[in-house]
Amino acid sequence: MKIQFYKYQGTGNDFIILDNRDGKYHDLTNEQVKIVCDRRFGIGGDGLMLLNLREGYDFEMIYYNADGQEGSMCGNGGRCLVKFAYDIGIHREMYRFLATDGTHEAEIDPDGIVSLKMKDVHEIKVNHGDFILDTGSPHYVKMISNVMEYDVYKKGREIRYSTAFAEQGINVNYVEQTNDDEIIVRTYERGVEAETYSCGTGVTAAALICYHNENGFNDVTVRTRGGKLSVEYDRIAEDHYENIWLCGPAEKVFEGEISIKN
């Protein structure tokens, strides 16, 4: 089976994208997804996405983790898919697409920054001083110092596979606040089972925890290993966040063709 693929990245979070508007990749198996995401035996990527046709929307986003399993929402993946849609001729002032967690809107500014509207958040749980919330994917957020020196792989893996989260797993974010409106985030991602250079839903979760305005508009700059993102949102009340936008670059890396076993 030959696959025409496109490789995109958003702050180092990289994805394989397949144009599936004609349905030719509907039968792609989990094992095939895993193979093409493999960095040694395939193309290599943190995940794979299908761009599907969907009535009433500009497109539908189907996301697979690097382990081959269909995943929950991916923020940087969504931003990359919007940029891919633009590159293949789907031009909109405001995009509207369907993902696993519902409807999303997105736009691309003249400088190429892709802004993606995330789901509202209405609940944040506190766990021994840390935080648990769902921004389209489940996230554990821990505030620490000297985050760039922290063993994110080891410590994140311990939490991800702990008894409390054993059934579905959880993404684990370590966050250092550098000033009132800037943070550094490093994330251990389930499905990749490693630290990624950036995680859009994780960055969003961390930014909500690190609000600087008790009520009203917040704009948090987030530094990741792969670059800078920003998260804008309205804090309506405690544990109530709306108009959440994840903003940052999304770029095509290369395209090509790969042959895989049926």
Image: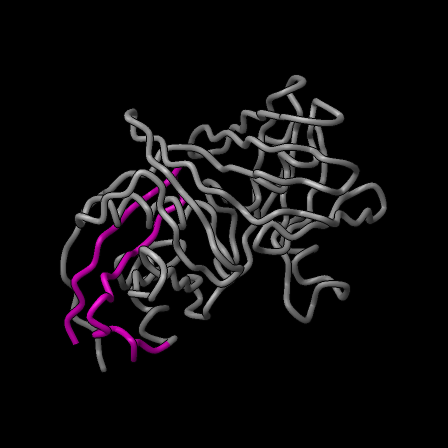
Q: Between 73 and 238, which is closer to the camera in this rendering?
A: 238
Residue farthest to the bottom, as pictured: 262
Residue 18 percent coordinates (x, y): 25, 61
Q: Does 73 sit left or right of 144 as displayed?
A: left
User: Which residue appears at 29% of the width and 76% of the height?
Assistant: 26
Determine the image quadrant of residue 113.
top left
Which scheme is used to colour this image of the protein?
Answer: one colour
Q: Nearer the viewer, residue 41 or 209?
A: 209
Residue 238 spot, x, y in % from top left: 79, 38
Compared across the picture, whether 220 is left or right of 114 comes to right
**56 with respect to 261 (left or right):** right
Residue at point 38% right, 44% down?
79
Residue depicted at 40% across the width and 54% down the height: 46
Q: Quadrant of residue 206?
A: top right
Image vertical order of residue 212 relative to residue 60, above or below: above
Asked if the stretch drawn in magenta spans residue 30, the answer is no
User: x and y percent of residue 25 in the render?
Assistant: 25, 73
Q: Residue furthest top?
A: 179
Considering the image in quadrants, where does the C terminus appear?
A: bottom left
Q: Residue at x 76, y 66 (%)?
A: 163
**Number of numbered callouts drawn:** 0
- Give the residue at the far right of this rendering: 128
Q: Which residues are magenta?
A: 1-29
